[in-house]
Structure formats: C-alpha cells, structure tokens
Amino acid sequence: MRKLTLIIIIILSILAIFSTISAFKYKRQLQNSNIQIKDLQSTISEYKESQNIFSHESYPIDKKLEKCTSENFITIGMNNCTNAGIEAWNKEILDYSKQIEKYLNKEELLLFTNAQTAWEDYYKKEKDFINKTIAQKDGDIHTTIAIGDLYELTKQRALSLKSYLMQLSE
C-alpha cells in the first residue's frame, strides 16, 4: 500500500511539474500574443485615423450643399444644389489630376490616364444605370436619392485623387 501511495505521489508530482511547465509556456505564449494584438490594434488605430482624414472631414463643398439644400426644400431645388456639388467635385478631380500628373513619369502618366479614363467610363455607366433605374421609380424622392448617389461617387473619386496626391508629394 505504501508503494502504491508513493507511486501515486510520484505520478502526481510529475503531472504537477508538467502542468506548471505547460502553464508557464502558455503564459509566455499568451504574453507574446497580447503584445502582437496590441501592435495590431495600434496599427489599425493609426490606419483608421488616416482614413478619418477623408471620411469624416467636413469639406466646403459639403457645407455649401448642406446650406443650399436647407434653403431649397422642393425636389428640383435640392437636385440643383446636388448638381452644383457634383460640378464642384468634378473641378476638384480635374485639379487633383493636373497636380498628380506633375509627379509622374511617362509610364506612370499613361497608367494614370488609363485609370482616369476607366473611372470616367465607369461613372458614365453608373450614372446611366442609376438614372434608368433608381431615378425612374415612383416618387420624387428617388431622383434626389439617385443624384445623391452620383454626388457621393464623384466625391469619392476626388478624395481618392487627393489621397494619391498626398502620397506622391511626400
């Protein structure tokens, strides 16, 4: 009986030692994982902050649109305001494009020109689709929704070009 008790004590001691070693290894792995998670969280936070420069910034064009639409409650008035906003963003697109071109060599300029032409083709097709579907639905609100979608599409391109310009000019 003493031998059996001794064997059980030895086995339990060995299990305790292995458990302790495993716990320390797991704790070390967990600490390393926590460090990696904090690094990733920091990277994600920095990325979000850089994206927020564009996504939450209030632009003069947006402010002008908001003021205009608050003064023009009828559909045609709101749509005219939004059209003016689209024209303003298109001017930004032209301005950013001209500035970007200054930083590009011939090969890069060709790539940029092709990308811009492809975006313009995409915009025309998207506009055609929106105007023949969403804008044609019953109710005046759908024309306002459709033109709002085109406004956001134009704004997005302008802000993308602004981002490219910022990166190229660094």
Image (spheres, grey):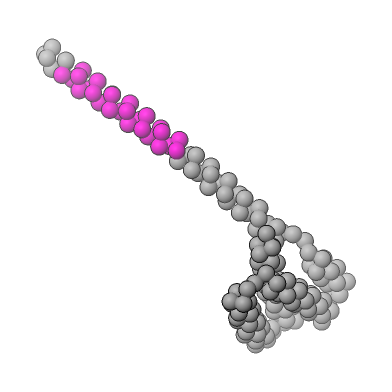
Against 97, residue 16 (above or below) is above
Q: Residue 43: x, y in percent?
A: 57, 49
Q: In the shown orientation, is residue 54 left or right of residue 43?
A: right
State which quadrant residue 60 falls in. bottom right
Percent coordinates x, y for residue 15 in the rendering: 25, 26
x and y percentages locating residue 31 in the rendered image: 45, 35
Q: Residue at x 85, y 72 (%)?
A: 68
**Residue interval drawn in magenta:** 7-32
Q: Is residue 30 magenta?
A: yes
Answer above or below: position of 166 versus 91. Answer: above
Residue farthest front in this picture: 105
User: In the figure, residue 58 lies in which quadrant?
Assistant: bottom right
Q: Quadrant of the C terminus?
A: bottom right
Is residue 67 inside the magenta stretch?
A: no
- Is residue 86 visible to us here? no
Q: Residue furthest top?
A: 2
Q: Looking at the image, is 41 positioned above or below residue 78?
A: above
The residue shown at (86%, 75%) is 72
Left/right placement of residue 104 relative to residue 85 reads left
Along the line of sight, which residue is nearer the eye, 100 or 75?
100
Q: Residue at 81% of width from left, 78% of height from top?
A: 84
Residue 30 vertical position relative to residue 143 in the rendered view, above or below:
above
For the point 48% across and 39% down, which residue is it? 34
Magenta: main secondary structure equals: helix
Q: Is residue 99 visible?
A: yes
Direction from residue 85 to residue 109 in the image, left or right = left
Residue 33 point in image, percent of width and height: 45, 41
Quarter the N terminus occupies: top left
